[in-house]
Amino acid sequence: MRRILTLLGALAVLMGLVWMGQGSGYFPYPASSFMIDQSPWIAYGAGLALVGIVLIAIGRRSGR
């Protein structure tokens, strides 16, 4: 269970960072993405990254 939570948390953090990058325009890939330069995606990405950090913390805690 620890490994699954850590993996899901890491994926959520990575995806959240990509969403934040696309929403802010720093990561304009793919060029036709509807998320580029759309500020709500910065908040959505930050929220997802925060959920990922919580999942990692829970996973690390459950392993003890």
Image (cartoon, rainbow, N blue to C red):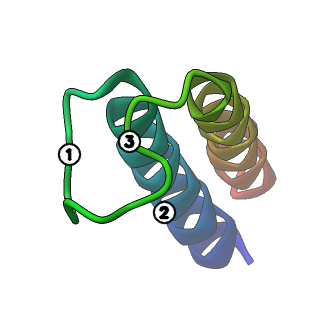
* 29 sits to left or right of 14: left
Say which of 19 and 55 sits in front: 19
Vertical order, 63 against 3 (above or below): above
Q: Position of residue 35 (x, y in %)?
A: 48, 48
Which amino acid type is shown beneath numbered disc 2?
Leu
Mark 1, residue position: 28
Describe the element under mark 1 as helix, strand or loop.
loop
Q: Separation of disc 3 and disc 1 at Cα?
A: 6 Å
For label 2, the SS is: helix
Q: Is residue 50 above or below residue 13?
A: above
Return the mark for residue 52.
Answer: none
Q: Residue 57: give x, y in percent of width and height.
A: 68, 37
What is the C-alpha distance between the residues marked 2 and 1? 20 Å
Name the residue beneath numbered marker 2.
11
User: Given the image, on which type of amino acid does mark 3 rest?
Assistant: Ile
Query: Of marks 2 and 1, which one's residue comes earlier in the chain?
Result: 2
Crowding around mark 3 (Cα neighbors within 10 Å: few <14, some 14 to 19, many 20+) is many
Circles 3 and 1 in contact, beta carbons < 8 Å: yes
Q: Check residue 36 in the rendering and tell me which mark sits there, or answer none.
A: 3
Taking the spot 48% from the left edge, 56% from the top edge, the residue there is 34
Sooner in the amino-acid sequence: mark 3 or mark 2: 2
Q: Which numbered disc flags the more N-terminal residue, 3 or 1?
A: 1
